[in-house]
Image (cartoon, grey):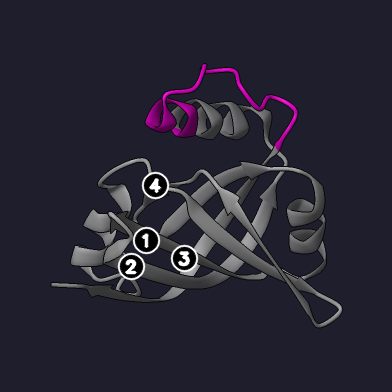
Amino acid sequence: MTDAVPPEAAELLRSEPLMAHLATSVDGRPHVAPVWYSYDDGVVRLVTAGRKLANVRENPRVALSVQKDEGGDALWAVTLLGTATVVEDDAAFRDANRRINAKYGADADAYEGNTLVRVDVGSATYRTYD
């Protein structure tokens, strides 16, 4: 496991199908959008299209935030900073897409028109709330 993500934060990221918010930037302007993701060993994988994908192609520096709430109260939050790479490999896309869709209960072949993005995590912060 990468040293960038503490084991406790890694477990939270894998714990359940929560939405992540992906922050990208191009021309000095931020763009944040919800995404489904998978996490393993310091790497986030997501499949996406549109503005998010275009932004990653122009500027690979990204952030992701995942938070679990209960009744409007935060239970925990993890923030990741990393470098995104667009992966142009059909087999890698199919594998990641299948895993992500299974995590969120979607059909295995949903989002076939999207593109795989790999985020190598450089740093992570997390907090649990009591």
Marks 3 and 4, how far apart in space? 10 Å
The residue indicated by pointer 1 is 67
* Amino acid at the residue labelled 1: Gln
Among numbered discs 1 and 4, the one appearing first in the sequence? 4
Marks 1 and 4, how far apart in space? 7 Å
Q: Which stretch appears magenta?
A: 100-114
Residue 119: quadrant of the picture = bottom right
Marks 3 and 1, how far apart in space? 7 Å
* Amino acid at the residue labelled 3: Ser
Residue 103 in magenta stretch: yes
Residue 70 higher or lower than 104, as above or below? below
Q: Which SS class for mark 3?
A: strand
Q: Which SS class for mark 4?
A: loop
- Extreme residue in the right direction: 27
Quadrant including the N terminus:
bottom left
The residue indicated by pointer 2 is 77
The residue indicated by pointer 4 is 18
